[in-house]
Image: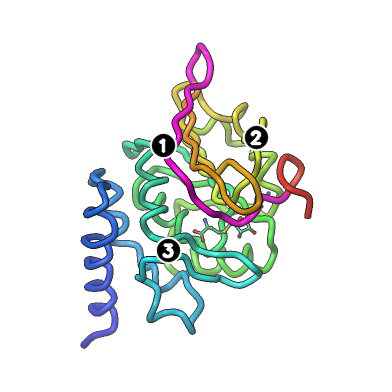
Amino acid sequence: MNEELKYKRWRQEMVKTQISSRGITDSKVLHAMSTAPRHKFVPEALIESSYGDFPLPIGEGQTISQPYIIAEMTQCLELTGDEKVLEIGTGSGYQAAILAHIVYKVYTIERNQTLFLQTRKLFDRLKYHNIVTKYSDGTQGWKEHSPYDAIIVTAGFRQIPPPLIDQLAIGGKLVMPVGGHMSQELVRIEKTKDGINSLNLGGCRFVKLIGQYGWDE
Ligand code: SAH
């Protein structure tokens, strides 16, 4: 069988058995997950496991999240298509690619230089022209392009970095794993003109958010 056709079938199977069946209903999220080639975002040696129901190592001690977690985090942002989104923790680039299928523009920051360089090249190769990358400490946000309609943080810390809340638009949503080293809760906040509304989406386990408003190295 043609290799790309094989991966397309695996992708359809992933969406059916791991995503739709667990309650993800947003058609934009389902479409993005059916389209983005996850197998191109994982290390060569793990390509045959790329559509499995688990996170995978991507080098530098980091991981690409389980497909379901990515779908859940994306869905809770309630995106419609014309948004400007900021991601902290580019990693493999897969979460940014999912967002890029849905929204107008994705800004993504990575603090690990090896992953930053590798993933920037991949975005070029796969022609994700609406993703803009930066090598920096994402806990400080990216003021230049703020305010953002949505912010997604794909590494965990005890609290949401204050600069990210500042750089979120009124009516904007932010999702982040909040908690200790070993486990966190996925928290989604909405910034309104009267304050912050918070929603807990349940337990999760992410790598550490390291930086000025995160863990020490
Ligand atoms: N969204 C990624 C997940 C990668 S794991 C994906 O789809 O693959 C989390 C990433 O956050 C790691 O690559 C780690 O280096 C990065 N990270 C941790 N702290 C960071 C910070 N302060 N700023 C930017 N990136 C950070």
Residue annotated with mark 1 = 83
Q: Earlier in the sequence, mark 2 or mark 3?
A: 3
Per the image, label 3 sits on a secondary structure element best described as: loop
Alpha-carbon distance for marks 2 and 1? 16 Å
Residue annotated with mark 3 = 127
Q: Quarter of the image containing the C terminus?
A: bottom right
Alpha-carbon distance for marks 3 and 1? 19 Å
Under mark 1, the amino acid is Glu
Residue annotated with mark 2 = 143
In the displayed structure, 160 sits above or below 45; it is: above
Q: Is residue 86 visible?
A: no
Q: Quadrant of ligand 1?
A: bottom right
Alpha-carbon distance for marks 2 and 3? 26 Å
Which span of residues is magenta-colored? 192-210
Taking the spot 73% from the left edge, 48% from the top edge, the residue there is 215
Q: Earlier in the sequence, mark 3 or mark 1?
A: 1
Q: Nearer the viewer, residue 77 or 135?
A: 77
Asked if residue 156 is among those painted magenta in the image, a careful observer would answer: no
Give percent across and percent down for residue 66: 42, 61
**Crowding at mark 3 (Cα within 10 Å: few <14, some 14-19, many 20+):** few
**Crowding at mark 2 (Cα within 10 Å: few <14, some 14-19, many 20+):** few
